[in-house]
Structure formats: structure tokens, C-alpha cells
Amino acid sequence: MPAPTVLYRFGDFELQPGQRLLLRHGQPLTLTARAFGVLVALVERAGQLVSKDELMQLVWAGLVVEENNIAVHVAQLRKLLGAPAISTIAGCGYRFALEVSRGAAQPAVAGRESGESDEPPGNLPARAPALIGRAAELAELGALLDAHPLVTVCGGPGVGKTHLAMAAATRRRARHRDGSWWIDLAPLTDGAQIAPLIAGTLGLKPVAGEDTLAALVRRLKPRSLLLVLDNADHLAPEVARLAGALVQATPRVSVLVTSQVPLRDPAHRLLRLGPLGLPPEGASIDEAARCDAVQLLAERAAGAGSPLAGDARSIDAATDICRRLDGNALAIELAAARLPALGLAALAERLQQRLGLLAPLPQVPASRQNALAAALDWSHGLLSPAEQQVFRRLGVFPGAFELDRAALCLADDDLPAPRVIETLLDLADRSLLSVDRASAPRYRLPESIRLYALDKLQASGEAAAVRAAFARGMCAVFDEAYEDHWRSNPQGAPGAWRDRWAPELDDLRAALDEATANDPDRAVALYGSASPLWGALLLHAEARERGEALVGRLSGGLPVRVLARFWEGVARAHSTEYPQRCRAAAELAAQRYAELGDARGEYLAWAEFALNWRLDHPEARRALARAKAIEDPRWPAPVLVHGRTTEAVLDFTGGDAERAREALLSLALLCERDGYLEGTLRTGANLVDIDRHTGRSADAIRRGEALLPRLPPGRASANEFTLFANLVGALLDQGEVVRARAVVGECARRLRRLPEDSCMWSMLDLFGVLHALSGRTDAAARLAGASAHNYRERGRLVRQPNEEADRARLAGLLARHPDAAELAAWQAEGELLSIAEACELAFEAGG
């Protein structure tokens, strides 16, 4: 039976020279090979003076090196073990000052015989750190290891590759007769050192004259064991060759690798490790508390002496922190360590400075295990100069991007677009870019990595040029989006235009901010080209604010087309909400488009001008006549809807409801032909309104109920709200109060997050009628007051026919209240409600 190998214990540490391991509380620590050699030499002679010459002979035998190398490694050891661990004897050498006990370690592979112990051999800690979450990933990794001899866990910095590999190895160690062995490759600088390190860890002595890898393969052929090669990023090609050779030549050796870069070996199988699970939008407090990321934060916070409260406010704050940290395990653990000093609220406020915040105290040296910036430094250092250049430039993208659009923004004469795309794919391969493959692949830098990239960009001296190029590129992107918007259902599915371009919103905002500050002409152009997206996402308020900020910065040198689109965007931002401002901007847009000879643009602008009279008016009719004179019936539905809907509105408010109805029925067929669902909903809602006014309430109800199942899930729009509201009006006309309440409830569930400027204010009287019929006179009176206030504020002194009828009906119902003073007080309270408060009160009519 072979002699046991020797181990040494001192303080919280355990040193296993034969296995080249230093453990603290059972956890392996990272040391360079030379520092490890210095430590072994000192510990084996604990309490004795070890001269510098002796250390040089023991650690650097046969090499000529500078004497100060010893001091460097001693300093590293003092940081790890504590300064008192090693004493300096001035002019003589060093002495290991801690009390050391000597014991026996588990025999290594080379000398183990079956049946010697119930515990399998290996160097894994007896108790691995608890793995929070990752149940699915752990099961998947286990299945891969069952089926394949070589598996890599691949993921970005700090995502938790090492913890997952440790958990998997610990779970499987009983399956391998000759143990599970952990080898940290981080200290190595040369691929030639890998095989000797593995052999030394396993206790396999070198054979003179024999290649180390060949000897390792020969010695491991009869063995059954698992090798875990941790931190293989910087030596991936060499690790791939060695691991491939091992698994090809040995029948029962499995190799598990952790790396940011996949191995290039045919036998290799890959597990991509993403961020910890985050709760979906709208998740309950219980669901949020159970998600992996929040559980990790809670567990580490409790360990730091600052347990999370279980109330909704605390869970919401914890969820927000985990989201902003992208579910990154290392970042969450480091954030939890700051909670005792800061608390949730202060921690959240400081996350923008997370690279400095998520680090150890000054007296503790930073490492990839305890500092986010150090982990990112390691990853950044592995990149080529070209990869570093593209990586730092990507910091200007706060949102997700497609490859060709990123290349449009980042390429220059020295870095052409094809090279940018190739490099982006390399960065994704290195796990620095996250990939969303839900539809067309989109890429993004997780926020912590993006902030790091921005620091690098600022230090590079090219930040201003890159930001300007980003704004220029996004302008070209949205020129394409603008033209795409007016095509006939270009993507082949209802709502596809919005789905395609909505993910560009964060990058659009960043580019607009940059251009507004430094290149107003570019900002004006970008704002105009992006105008369809503001409307599609119901961001009218933001569009109004951004547009008005640019009005005062219009220069005389702007191209006419840029000015035309800009004023078109301003008009659409104010449409229906602030009709006077809309008309003024629409007229300017129409004049510019006429100068260009752009019939489509002029048609759309005059239609917008006419629609925003909101009733039949001579000026509206003149504008509509201009639009009709240049209308081309071959235009697709997204264009024609604007002019023909306006025509129907003017006919309806002018008293010719039947003509309006016929026009809308024809328009509905056009929208169905082109697959334009938004137009179908808008036209259908208007038809319900007209049927209601002309006494066809039963037809209105049938039409509205038939459209409800066609509403796209998870996506609100002003057209949907108008449809719901008009259907409620028709139901009340028929006395179907119970069904009306149910429709309001469904409307509230779908559209409660609808922006305030979505014409909801024009339906407040209608909801007031439902409240009054349900016995809530106080709510009805408050909505009457809120309605009056909103019509005045928006310059709408005349109501459309059904709006006027609903107002009269509500007034009649309120007049039955016996206390006029109380009624007046409620209405005065309603006048003071914000539109958001009024809408919440309106939705209460649905229970």
C-alpha cells in the first residue's frame, strides 16, 4: 500500500504540495506556479530562516533570474495569507511564522487500490459551495457528461461557470473510481505547462525522457476519473489539443472545461451558460422572490448579515438590482456584500458606478473572484487589438442590435464593415455579447460589460468620433425604417413592422441624445425618420418633448426632405391630443413635400391637417381636397388609411353618416387585402362608432365582438382602446350593462399601461355613464369634471356626435342626484385629476 501524501495546515489554510493545491475553508485558491513553490519551501521549513539563495535554488533551480522575483512572490503570498504569515529577516531571508501542523492527504491516482476507502479520491472540497438556482443547467450538464467525454461550460465573465462545474463534479465524484480532480489553469502562462500541472496534481511523477502528455495518456488509460480544467480561456487551443488527446486515448476519463471560449474539437460538447433567471415582466412578488437571481441576492445578503425583507417593496427593489446587473452571478454576489453598508435603495442608486462599487475593500487585493472590474480586465486582456477596438466602440449601443446595423455605425476606413461583423461574431463566441435568437439574431453587451467598454472608449481618445459615427449610422437605419413603414405589410404578418423596429428604441434614444447635444442637424433628420416608431409605440409625449426641443435649433442649411419629415414627425406627435399644434406642423410638412414633388408625403401631411379639425370644417375640407387630388389608388393600405379615414370623419361629423359608413367599409376591404391589422382595427372601431350613431347598435356590437379575438396579444394600441370604448357605448345603448362592465374589465387588463395621451380622455363621459348606471354617482361626477377639463386643455370645444350624446346622457343621469352642492364638489374634484388618475377611475367601472 503506497504511503499517503503529505499535507500542511495553518490557520484557515491547507497546503497539499503533491497535488499543487492551496485550500482555504476547503476552497481552492489561485497562485502562480512560482509563488506556490516559494510557499511550499517556506512551509516545509516553518519557523526556520530560509535564505534568498536557498529559495532561488529550490524554486528557480538552473535558471538565472532577478533576486527581486522572490520579493514579488512573497508580497503575493502575504496578500493571500495575511502579512504576519511571512517574516523578513533583514539581509538574510524569510521565515514562515504561522504554526503549521502536518498530516496525511488522500493518496493520488497513481497509488490507489480499490476498496481502501469509502470516499473516492480527488481534490474536491468535502463540501462544495451551495449552488443557488441553476437546477436546469446542472441537469443538462450532467446529461452531457453522461453522453460525452469532453464537455465545456462556456459563458461570460462572472456568469458562474466555476460554481456550476464544481457542483457537477461534486455530484459525480462517486461515479469515478479514481476520483474527480480540479485543476485551475489561470496561473499558467504557457500551454506546455498544462500536462505537467495535471500530472503533478494527480501525483504522477515524470518519467525521464518521456513526453509529459504521452506519459499522462499512458498512465490514465486504465483509470476512471473526471478532470475539471477551470479557467481555460487564455489557453483554449492548447487545452483543446490536450483534452482531445486524453479522451481519444482513454476509455473512462472525462474532461470538463470552463472557458469563455468554446474548444475547437470534434469530440467536444458545449453548454452555453447564460445569466441567472430573472422574473418576467408582470411577475408576482412570490414569483420574483423564487427566481434564481433574486434568490442568490437574498442568500448572499443573509450571509453578509443583511437579510432581505420579504415585503413587496424589498422584493421589487431586489428584482430591479438583479435586472440591472443582467443576472450576472458575480455582480449579484458582490452587490450583496455591499448591502449591510448601503441598503437596497442606496445600492440601486450607485449601480451606474458599479465597476468601482463591486470590489473588495482597499486592504484586500482585487481578483477575478472578488471584483467585477478585475474579471472584465481578464476578459479584455484576452482580446486582440482589433477585437478590443470593436468591443469598446460597442459601448455606445445601450440596446440590442443586428450585425449589419452595428457595422453601419462602427465601421470606418481602417475597420471595414465585413471585418466589424466578423469581429462581432468572435466577441459573441467569447461570451462577451449576449444573443437573442427569438427572431432575427440580435446582440447586446450586458450593461456591466457595456459600462466597462465605455470606460475603455473614453480612455482611447476616440469617444467623440465613435459617438458621432453612431448617430450617423442610426440615421441611416431609420431612413430605412421610415420607407419600410409605408410599404404594404412588408414583413408578411400583422404588426410585423413594429416588432421589427421596436428593438431599436434604446439605440435611437442614445443616438438622438448624442446628436441633439453635438450635431442638431443630424438630430432633426433622425427625429423625422423615426416618427413612425414614436407613433407605433405610443410614445407621443416623448416625441412631442424631443421635437419641440429641436424646433428652436433648426438651421437654414437643412435639406428640404429633412425638414419635411421633421415637421411630419412633430405633427404626428401632437395628433388628436393637441390638434392646433398638429395642424400648424402638418401644414409646414405639406409645403415642404410639395416643394420636393413627393406626392405621398404631401398627401399624408394634408390628411393629418384635415383630421385634426376633428369635425367638418371648411379648412379641413380644403386640405382634404388637396390630398384627394394627388391620391394614388395603387398606394398600399398604410398610406391610404390616413386620407380615407379623414374623409369618413369629416362626412360623419358633417351629418352624412351613410357616406362615411360606405367609405369605411371599402377601406376595411383594402386593409384586409394588404394584411394591415392596425388599419383593420382603426376602421372597425370607426364603423362601430358610426353604427352606434345611426341606431345600428346591434350591428355595432356584432362588429366589435368579432374584432376582439383579433387583437394581438401583449401589445396595446390607441385603436384597441377606441374599439373597446365604442363597443361599451353600443352595449350601453342596448341596455347590456353587465356585458359592458365585462368589456371594460377586459380593456383594463389589456390596456392599463396604455400611455395617457391615447385619446382615453375623449371617452371619460362614456365611462362616467357606466359608473352612474352601476350606482357610483360620485365616480361618474368626477369623470364628468375630468372630461370637461381635458376637452378645454386640448382646445376641443366641439365634440363628435357620440361624444356629445354620451355627455348629454351623463348629465341627465347626474341631474337625478338630490344634492346639487355635493354633485358640484365631485365635479370640481374631477377637474383636478390628472389624466392618469381619471383613467384609473374610469377602468374601475369594470370592477
Image (spheres, rainbow, N blue to C red):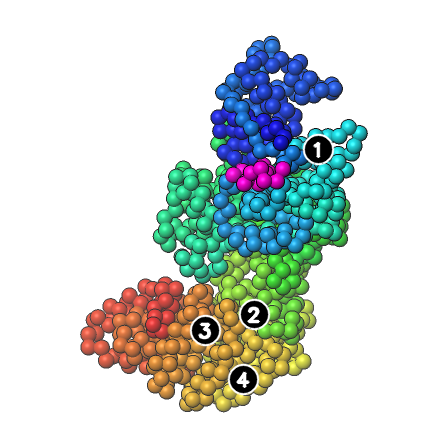
| Residue at the extreme top | 91
Residue 221: give x, y in percent of width and height.
72, 42
Q: At label 3, which amino acid type do we have?
A: Phe
Name the magenta segment's main secondary structure. Answer: loop
Q: CA distance from mark 2 to mark 4?
A: 25 Å
The N terminus lies in quadrant: top right
What residue did someone put label 3 on? 721
Which one is closest to the eye, mark 2 or mark 4? Answer: 4
Number of other residues with Cα within 10 Å of mark 4, as a class: few under 14, some 14 to 19, many 20 or more:
many
Number of other residues with Cα within 10 Å of mark 1, as a class: few under 14, some 14 to 19, many 20 or more:
some
Q: CA distance from mark 1 to mark 4?
A: 81 Å
Residue 759: give x, y in percent of width and height.
44, 71
Residue 556 visible from this viewpoint = no
Q: Give the SS element for disc 2.
A: helix
Q: At label 1, which amino acid type do we have?
A: Pro
What residue did someone put label 4 on? 664
Q: CA distance from mark 1 to mark 3?
A: 71 Å
What residue did someone put label 2 on? 587
Number of other residues with Cα within 10 Å of mark 3, as a class: few under 14, some 14 to 19, many 20 or more:
many
Q: CA distance from mark 3 to mark 2?
A: 28 Å
Q: CA distance from mark 4 to mark 3?
A: 19 Å
Residue 754 visible from this viewpoint = yes
The answer to whether 663 is drawn above or below residue 843 in the figure is: below
Residue at image position (75%, 45%) is 249
Which one is closest to the eye, mark 4 or mark 3? Answer: 3
